[in-house]
Structures are given as C-alpha cells and as structure tokens.
Amino acid sequence: MLRHLLIEVERLDFIRCENLTHIYNQGMENEYKALDNVSLSIKEGEFVTILGTNGSGKSTLAKHFNALLQPASGKCFVGGRDTSDEKLLWDIRQQIGMVFQNPDNQIIAAIVEDDVAFGPENIGMKPSLIKEHVASALAAVDMEDYRSFAPHLLSGGQKQRIAIAGAIAMNPQCLVLDEPTAMLDPQGRLEVMSTVKQLNHDHSITIINITHFMDEAALADRVIVMDKGKVVKEGTPREIFSDAISMKRMGLDVPVVAEVAFRLKDRGENIPEGIMTTEELVNALCQ
C-alpha cells in the first residue's frame, strides 16, 4: 500500500533529452559540436542548476528546452512533446518561460505593468485574464508597488524581477534562467534568487538556472555539471561540491564555505565531508 502511494506522488519528467546532439555550422569548415549525446531528465516542480565553463554547452542546451534550436540528432521532449515537431512549437514555447542575462534587452514597454502584459497579449490571452495574470505575476516577484513605474528608474535586480514577472505572466510550467544574475551586484543577485526560490517553493514552477555562481547553485535540488558538450556529473549540491578537486579540474569553483572546509581538511583538520553551510562548518570546528 505504502509503495503504491509513493509511486502515485512521484513527480513526472517534464523535460527529457535522449542522446541530444547539436552542431553549429554543420557541414562547414567551422563546424562545432556544442552538445554531444546529452541524456538527462528534469522533473515537474524540480529546481535544477546547470553549471559549466564558457563553451561547455549549457546555454545551447537551454535553447533546446523551448525549441529555439533543433537537434542535429537525438531528441528533446518538453511535457511529452517532441521539440523537433514544428506543429508543437507553439505549445512548447507557452510552457517554457525564458529569462536572459541582461534585463534591459527584455524590457520593451515604458511602464512596468505594460511590459509584464506584453507576453500574454502576444499569445492572445483575453484582456480580463491579462489583468489578472499581470497582478499575480507582479505579486509573485514582490513588485506590485512598482506597476506604474518607468523601468529605467529601477535597479538591476528590480528590472530582472520584472523580466521574470513577464515570463510567468504567461503561466508557464517551467522557467529557464540563462545567467540571470551575471550583470547584477550582490544585492540584485540576492533579490533575484530569493524570487526564483519562492516561485519554485510556493508556485511549484520548475526552475532551470544556468549560472557561474556556486552559491546560487547550492540553492538547487540538483546540480548538472557540463563540460565540452557532455553531462559529466549530476547530484545534489552537497554531492557535487564535496568533490572540490574534480570541480577545480574542470575550471569550476565550489561555494565559499565548501572551499574553506576543503582547505581545512587538506591541512589535516578533522572536518567531515559535504560541509555546505556556515553553521555546519562552525559546528564541525567547535567539536
């Protein structure tokens, strides 16, 4: 009976890639294989971080999730729909909200609420529903008080939250964020990641966050590490960052606390594996 209940509540795969390969400039002299037989799955409501150095293929992979790119070979499925089927592209893109690095490139209206309404209007949503979705999206990112502001008066973090509101106003099941905090100061980064975590926790939106910041990666349920177009590691943040040596070999860092714990252990201190938080490190040292 218990096993039956566990199976019943198990989350389904929302995104599934099977031997996905992507080649830029295929058949030309400058042909480049950006993805090489990538197989992975992301479940409904999961918060996943994708890590990798520049050129590892993570942004190319993200563009397959909403069918901006098509596989050279292999398959990508979103909500069970094959992204290579042109008849399904509209449905797929309505399920996936995309947010990129520079919020200034995503904000097009002179007033915040008009900008958030732009996406729903483009997909033909009824005016009564648009108003409701805009209000709900601004509330979800804690920006209701700024609905009548001009976007250029906002901080970088606030602009990015407006970009996120514009994406979720279309009621997507999944939000893909491609380096969303790369151009922000620490306060802006904190604002955006707090918003993203809340959307995942309170609204069960599937989150895929592509980042260079290890502290952001530590917030995820699962981390996928890419290198040279392949998935080379995946696991919980604790599992991934406890192996600091292999991360550094790939040109990646680990969160500051994990780095300190690694150096102390390397120096001979009796520090347990998998330290991820300041509290855990303090407790280990005090003992």
Image (cartoon, helix red, strand yellow):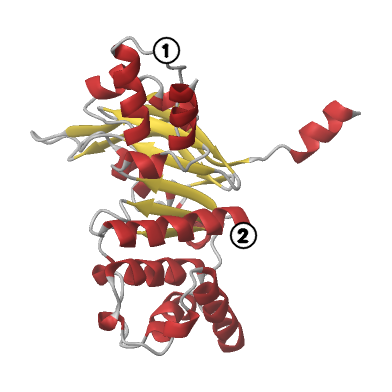
Q: What amino acid is at disc 2?
A: His
Query: Which residue lies most toward the left here?
Result: 29
* Label 1 packing within 10 angstroms: few (<14), some (14-19), many (20+): few
Q: Secondary structure at mark 2?
A: helix
Residue 179 vs residue 143, the one in the foreground: 143
Instruction: State whether residue 22 is above or below residue 264.
Output: below
Q: Position of residue 75 (x, y in %)?
A: 45, 36
* Residue at image location 32% in from the left, 84% down from the top: 109
> On the rendered image, what quadrant is the N terminus found in?
top right
Please name the residue that numbered disc 1 is placed on. 270
Q: Secondary structure at mark 1?
A: loop
Query: Which residue lies most toward the front here?
Result: 286
Q: Position of residue 133 (x, y in %)?
A: 56, 77
Q: What amino acid is at disc 1?
A: Asn
Q: Position of residue 123 (x, y in %)?
A: 49, 74
Eye-nearest disc, 1 or 2: 1
Query: How far is mark 1 from mark 2, CA to CA?
Result: 41 Å
* Residue at image location 25% in from the left, 53% down from the top: 182
Please name the residue that numbered disc 2 is placed on. 203
* Residue at image location 28% in from the left, 36% down from the top: 57
The reply to whether residue 86 is in sight is yes
Instruction: State whether residue 130 is above or below residue 205.
Output: below
* Label 2 packing within 10 angstroms: few (<14), some (14-19), many (20+): few
Query: Which residue lies most toward the right here?
Result: 1
Quadrant in which residue 60 is drawn:
top left
Quadrant in which residue 106 is drawn:
bottom left
